[in-house]
Image: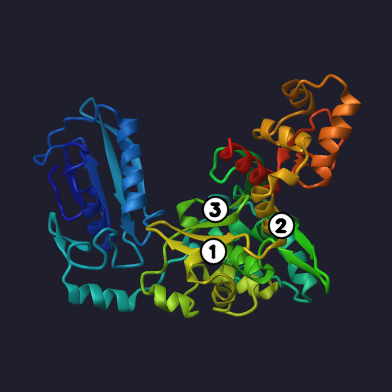
């Protein structure tokens, strides 16, 4: 069998082989095609020595080096031919033409088309025409890997807003593909799914000292969203500063901006990456990371000006129905009003929002003060703070400090450090638990850093 307009042979997968070009050409071709690894140009079978490694590298390169996402448009399988193992890559014709190599963008160096038995650069005129005609792909076009879905939670959220879901809601909410199967939107909103959003908390400024890791998911994405909002609302502690004139209360993060950032990350996450957004709390900041770059036709300037191109229009519509989203394009301006453009970082595959603890936040000020005036802190607290690394139980701390009397240790070391906010319980709802431990707060970390830097 020789190469044809739908069949391409490659002897082996090497770093030098431009496999992305071949895949792009088939994605842009009206009929798709097949790429065989382990077969010479003349059709002779040579085989693949390490099939698993080759398949893994193929998937990784196709997944990360081609735009728009080719996920769901290709399949990689092992086959036997003439007693040898070969790999067959099946590539479907995509619906978001033009596809291109991410590195070179929508140019003749990035976009290719299958012509005869070769992949040829696509003329710029054709690229522009296809882009103008593009029907944007979305999770609404991706078939759910589960079809046994239920939506009782979704009904409840609509009922709470006085909006009844009729018998045709699956179609009206665009939970079905054109052929009547549940799509990925339905999967994310179903009562049960495999999607989970993580909220992590660290006691260090890097990711070395994880003190808390919560997962919210395996349920309707709306329920997971509400759980994340509630968790971060609890973490967004209001600190008070008493002045001669008034009591000033300030949360760690601007509440309006925080809510918008959470919703934005979840609604606009590129779920075709199969990576949910994540939320990470550090002593000095909150980092929110969502998968996916800016839409190809949206510049950073337009983004910061509040122009919105919803990545997941189906989710946006439903979130507006249940009043988690107010109006299209309003979220980013609210975030910018509080934190400015510098809080956003864009990469090829992710968008990150960093919300620092305000310099005027009284909790931050307390930590700052403790770092510069450690002499006002009791010797017992200073000793205790320097002994805590990560999460530590009471017996270990008592042993490290060399105190034998438990009551004296608690009244002189533990209680004052808790009362003054230098340490906290790891299990605040189970203070008498045998699993109870202690960790430093942001204020405690600042004090420890001050003590260690002055040594």
Q: 32 or 334, which lies in front?
A: 334
According to the picture, the residue beneath numbered tag 3 turns out to be 276
Quarter in which the C terminus is drawn: top right
Residue at 21% across, 41% down: 15
Mark 1 and mark 2: Cα distance apart in space: 53 Å
Describe the element under mark 1 as helix, strand or loop. Answer: loop
Residue that numbered label 2 is attached to: 363
* 328 sits to left or right of 14: right
Q: Which residue position holds label 1?
A: 180
Q: Quadrant of the N terminus?
A: top left
Considering every residue shown, the one lying at the far left of the view is: 42
Q: CA distance from mark 3 to mark 2?
A: 31 Å
- Which colour scheme appears in the figure? rainbow
Q: Earlier in the sequence, mark 3 or mark 1?
A: 1
Crowd band around label 2 with a 10 angstrom C-alpha radius: few (<14), some (14–19), many (20+): many
Q: Is residue 380 above or below residue 296?
A: above
Label 1, residues with CA under 10 Å away: few <14, some 14-19, many ≥20: few
Q: Closest to the observer: 369 or 149?
A: 369
Residue 24: image location, x then y, percent: 26, 57
Q: Nearer the viewer, mark 1 or mark 2?
A: 2
Q: CA distance from mark 3 to mark 1?
A: 26 Å
Q: Are marks 3 and 2 in contact (CB under 8 Å)?
A: no
Helix, strand or loop status at disc 2: helix
Q: Is residue 181 visible?
A: no
Residue 173 image position (x, y, % from top left): 61, 71
Alpha-carbon neighbours of circle 3 within 10 Å: few (<14), some, or many (≥20)? Answer: some
């Amino acid at each position: 069998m020789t190469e044809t307009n739908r069949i391409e042979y490659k002897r082996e997968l090497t770093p030098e082989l431009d496999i992305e070009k071949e895949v792009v050409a088939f994605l842009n071709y009206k009929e798709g095609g097949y790429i065989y690894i382990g077969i010479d140009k003349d059709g002779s079978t040579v085989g693949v020595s390490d099939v698993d490694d080759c398949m893994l590298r193929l998937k990784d390169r196709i997944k990360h080096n081609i735009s728009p996402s080719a996920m769901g448009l290709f399949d990689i399988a092992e086959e036997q031919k003439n007693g040898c193992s070969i790999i067959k890559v099946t590539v479907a014709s995509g619906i978001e033409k033009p596809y291109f190599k991410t590195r070179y963008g929508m140019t003749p160096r990035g976009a290719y088309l299958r012509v005869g038995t070769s992949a040829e650069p696509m003329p710029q005129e054709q690229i522009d025409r296809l882009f103008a005609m593009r029907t944007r792909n979305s999770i609404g076009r991706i078939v759910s890997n589960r079809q046994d879905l239920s939506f009782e939670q979704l009904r409840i959220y609509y009922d709470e807003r006085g909006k009844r879901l009729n018998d045709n809601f699956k179609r009206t909410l665009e939970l079905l593909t054109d052929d009547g199967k549940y799509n990925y939107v339905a999967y994310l909103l179903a009562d049960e799914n495999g999607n989970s959003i993580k909220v992590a908390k660290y006691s260090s400024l890097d990711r070395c000292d994880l003190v808390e890791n919560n997962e919210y998911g395996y349920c309707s994405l709306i329920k997971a969203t509400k759980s994340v909002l509630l968790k971060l609302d609890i973490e967004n502690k209001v600190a008070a500063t008493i002045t001669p004139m008034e009591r000033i209360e300030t949360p760690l993060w601007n509440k309006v901006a925080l809510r918008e950032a959470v919703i934005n990350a979840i609604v606009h996450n590129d779920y075709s990456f199969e990576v949910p957004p994540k939320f990470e709390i550090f002593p000095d900041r909150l980092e929110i990371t969502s998968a996916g770059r800016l839409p190809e036709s949206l510049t950073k300037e337009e983004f910061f000006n509040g122009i919105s191109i919803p990545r997941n229009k189906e989710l946006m519509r439903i979130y507006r129905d249940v009043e988690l989203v107010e109006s299209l394009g309003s979220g980013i301006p609210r975030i910018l009003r509080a934190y400015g453009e510098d809080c956003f970082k864009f990469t090829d595959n992710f968008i990150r929002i960093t919300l620092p603890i305000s310099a005027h936040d009284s909790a931050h000020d307390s930590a700052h003060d403790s770092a510069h005036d450690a002499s006002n802190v009791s010797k017992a607290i200073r000793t205790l703070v320097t002994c805590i690394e990560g999460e530590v139980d009471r017996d270990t701390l008592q042993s490290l400090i060399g105190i034998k009397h438990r009551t004296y240790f608690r009244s002189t070391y533990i209680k004052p450090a808790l009362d003054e906010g230098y340490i906290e319980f790891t299990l605040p709802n189970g203070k008498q638990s045998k699993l109870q431990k202690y960790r430093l707060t942001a204020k405690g970390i600042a004090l420890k850093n001050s003590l260690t830097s002055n040594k």
